């Protein structure tokens, strides 16, 4: 199973595209995780119902078996690490964005914490610069 950390933006779409490719190569399915710490209405990284419909349409057209998990009131890092605990989870795919050193210090970095704490391989991807 390939786990994808999804956000409804270019970073999440890049992670999803790479996750689908990895699932095809490995002949496995996808577990797509979208999480928010609790204030879903104000968190632009939490997919609303329209974004989830679009996500599920893209997943259905991929031909790859999938499941979508939306977790509320959890830290996104914890949701991703929990999704990697089952034996069948073999790779975590996340989108990354450039952040200044001060930004990382003040706000933390989900990607950095995932890279450091995930016990299994992590593929960190960036969106195509033309999009």
Image: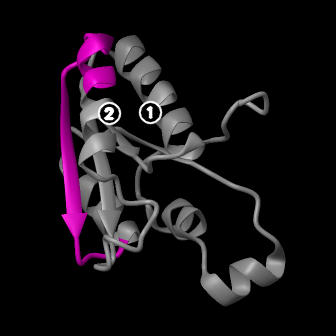
The one nearer the camera, 65 or 72, is 72
Q: Are marks 1 and 2 in contact (CB under 8 Å)?
A: yes
- Distance from Cα at disc 1 to Cα at disc 2: 9 Å
Q: 8 above or below 67?
A: below
Residue 78, how many percent across, how many down? 32, 71
Asked whether, in this view, residue 64 is left or right of residue 127, the answer is: left
- In the image, is residue 13 above or below residue 111? above
- Render colour scheme: one colour
Residue at point 44%, 50% (across, down): 7
Q: Quadrant of residue 19?
A: top left
Residue carrying label 1: 16
Q: Reply above or below: 81 against 74.
A: above
Number of numbered markers: 2
Quadrant where the C terminus is found in the figure: top right
> What is the span of residues highlighted in magenta in the rendered image?
57-75
Is residue 46 among the parts visible in the rendering?
Answer: yes
The residue identified by callout 2 is 55
Q: Position of residue 123 (x, y in %)?
A: 55, 41
């Amino acid at each position: 199973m390939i786990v994808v950390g999804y956000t409804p933006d270019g970073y999440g779409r890049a992670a999803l595209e790479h996750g689908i490719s990895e699932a095809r190569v490995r002949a496995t399915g996808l577990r797509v995780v979208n999480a928010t710490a609790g204030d879903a209405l104000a968190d632009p990284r939490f997919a609303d119902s329209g974004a989830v419909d679009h996500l599920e349409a893209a997943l259905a057209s991929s031909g790859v078996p999938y499941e979508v998990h939306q977790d509320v009131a959890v830290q996104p890092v914890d949701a991703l690490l929990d999704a990697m605990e089952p034996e069948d989870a073999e790779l975590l795919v996340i989108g990354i964005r450039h952040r200044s050193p001060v930004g990382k210090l003040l706000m933390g970095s989900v990607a950095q914490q995932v890279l450091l704490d995930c016990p299994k391989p992590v593929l960190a991807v960036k969106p195509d610069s033309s999009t």
